[in-house]
Image (cartoon, rainbow, N blue to C red):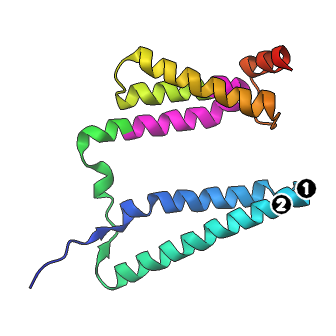
Amino acid sequence: MTTQKRVALGAELVIPVLALAFAIYFLVSTADLEWEAKANGVIIGGLLLLLLAVQFVRSAIAFVRGRANLSFAPLLQPADALRKRIGMLAVTIALVATVPWLGLGLGLFLSLAASLILMGVRGVGHALLVAFAVALTTTLLFTVALDSGLPRGPVDNFLFHLLR
């Protein structure tokens, strides 16, 4: 008789629960938009909710059959990765909180540079160069070329007025 290791559902469901919160936010935030945007929001949010429902049903079945428990232990292991995970969470929260005034370009540059350095990319200069290239390309595409309406900060406004 072999013993099967039980899946730690607590850890496995963190991302689906966050995705559920995002889907709800997405549906609520698109409710007041024009019908085309609202339709896209309903389609994308609805598909995400459907996929999440499938994941939650699969998890519930595994739990009821005894193949899973509600442990969060894998999130804490290995211990040396926990610092990086918490750091990435902090960088993400900081990006979301500051992008309305920093704008897409500067916010993306700072968060990507911090993330790459935190994750141990070889050389700070390399991390800064990659972050700069990604932020500049994104700003030129979404702010200057497409005028997508994403948040503009001082750098985005400067490039927008300089190049348009």
The majority secondary structure of the magenta stretch comes to: helix
Q: Give the range drawn in magenta.
A: 85-107
Distance from disc 2 to disc 1, alpha carbons, whole Å, reads: 6 Å
> Does the segment drawn in magenta span residue 87?
yes
Write the residue at 68% across / 61% down. Answer: 24
Q: What residue type is labelled 1?
A: Glu
Q: Residue 163 in the image: state x and y as whole percent.
A: 82, 18
Residue 31 seen from this side: no
Q: Residue 138 in the image: state x and y as whole percent.
A: 66, 31
- Residue for badge 1: 34
Label number found at residue 38: 2
| Residue 48 versus residue 151 in the image, above or below | below
Indicate left or right for 54 with 50 as reference: left
At label 2, counting other C-alpha atoms closer than 10 Å, the crowd grade (few under 14, some 14-19, many 20 or more) is some
Question: In front here: 148 or 84?
Answer: 148
Where does the C terminus fall, quadrant-wise? top right
Question: In front here: 92 or 70?
Answer: 92
Where does the N terminus fall, quadrant-wise? bottom left
Question: In front here: 142 or 24?
Answer: 142
| Residue 11 versus residue 70 in the image, above or below | above
Q: What residue type is labelled 2?
A: Lys
Q: SS for tag 2?
A: helix
Write the residue at 74% across / 34% down. Answer: 142
Q: Residue 28 in the image: state x and y as whole percent.
A: 76, 58
CB atoms of marks 2 and 1 within 8 Å? yes
Q: SS for tag 1?
A: loop
Indicate left or right for 95 with 143 as reference: left
Residue 16 seen from this side: yes
Farthest residue toward the right?
34
Write the residue at 52% across / 76% down. Answer: 54
Q: In which quarter of the image is residue 64?
A: bottom left
> Does the segment drawn in magenta span residue 39?
no
